[in-house]
Image (cartoon, helix red, strand yellow):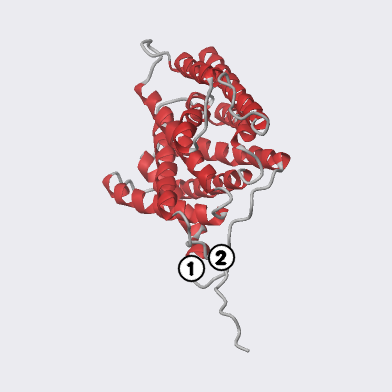
Amino acid sequence: MPLPNRKPRTRRAPARADRPFRGIALILTSTIFLGCSDVTAKYLSATLPSIEIAWIRFLVFSLIMVPAMLPGTRLFALRSERPGLQVMRGIALLSSSLFFISGLRFLPIAEASATGFIAPLFVTALSIAFLGEKVGVRRWLATIAGLIGVLIILRPGSSAFHPAAFFPIVSALAWAGTLIMTRMMSGRERAITTMTWSAITGVCVISALVPLVWVTPSWHDILFGIFIGIASTAGQWIVVLAFRYADASVLAPFSYTQLVWVSVLGFFVFGEIPDLWTIAGAAVIVCSGLYTAHRERVRRLQAPVEAEPSPNA
């Protein structure tokens, strides 16, 4: 009797699991790695151009992911159901990194990080177009409050305003796009696949730009650059994994702990102490983000009961 034809097995992404505490633990861990990476990038920005720092970061990222690029190995992860979306995510991730590092050259680390945490509010807006979500009045009011928090930090029109403050805002918008695309692929693409595509996309794009600003780095610079690459790669990987265990609305509040890490490290490394405006603005941004996450949680809990979400969700 002839044997039936068997199609070769394709390794699929593990299904999403509702394990919020595991997701929270992962996102808290990611903030340590990402915070250390940001502080080190600011330190390096005194001697190297932002593009070159980002290039070293993505080069190390790519080297770490080389085993997943080799066909015929168990770790091979270039097979993707959404290659176009993977490339777009990689460009968004690179843009977020590049704009944020550019801002760090001119801004205190706590100010840049607090401004960057407007990303969850951008996620709220982008989720309408890309995730088909409905956003009610109260979540829009929370988003507006977050924008007011950014204005408190930046104080446009005053002597304290620096044009480089726009860099963390653009970085936050790009990071929000990264999170949206991560969410769109969660449960369909393996974490290692997403990371590999992001590494390849990022290093290819930034390698075309780095010759324009090249400064020969010292061994000291190279070692710190390698640390940035390792720490940021670990942090990004953990973020991707966290989305498998909990929704963005659950994880968002805990991502704000990164502000604590960068503020503490900024004090010890650069002697920076956040001023009252930065603290007040950061508090407004965090509160608006927490409320947005709360309303998203309520909406999801009510979804099975209500045919349509409340207009004030």
Contact (Cβ within 8 Å) of mark 2 with mark 1:
yes
Give how far apart the Cα atoms at labels 2 and 1 are.
8 Å
Q: Position of residue 5 (x, y in %)?
A: 56, 79
Residue drawn where x is 58% and y is 43% of the image: 239
Which residue shows up at 51% across the image and 13% down it? 277
Q: Is residue 111 above or below residue 42?
A: above
Crowding at dot 1, Cα within 10 Å, few <14 / some 14-19 / many 20+, comes out as few
In the picture, the quarter occupied by the N terminus is bottom right
Residue at the extreme top: 158
Q: How crowded is mark 2: few (under 14 residues within 10 Å), some or many (20 or more)?
A: some
Q: Mark 2 points at which residue?
A: 75
Q: Residue 274: in sight, yes or no?
A: no
The amino acid type of the residue labelled 2 equals Leu
Which residue of the protein is positioned furthest toward the left in this rendering? 212
Left or right, residue 85 beside residue 310 = left
User: Upstream in the sequence, badge 2 or badge 1?
Assistant: 1
Amino acid type indicated by mark 1:
Leu
What residue lies at 63% left-to-right and 35% top-to-bottom?
Answer: 251
Q: Is residue 138 left or right of residue 85?
A: right
The quadrant of the rendering that contains the C terminus is: top right
- The residue nearer to you, when weighing 139 against 160, is 139
Res 196 seen here: yes
Q: Residue furthest front?
A: 307
> Horizontal and vertical percent for residue 227?
53, 47
2 relative position to 116: left or right? right
Give percent across and percent down for residue 43.
47, 36
Element on which disc 2 rests:
loop
Element carrying mark 1: loop
**Which residue is the site of mark 1?**
70
Q: Position of residue 108 (x, y in %)?
A: 47, 25
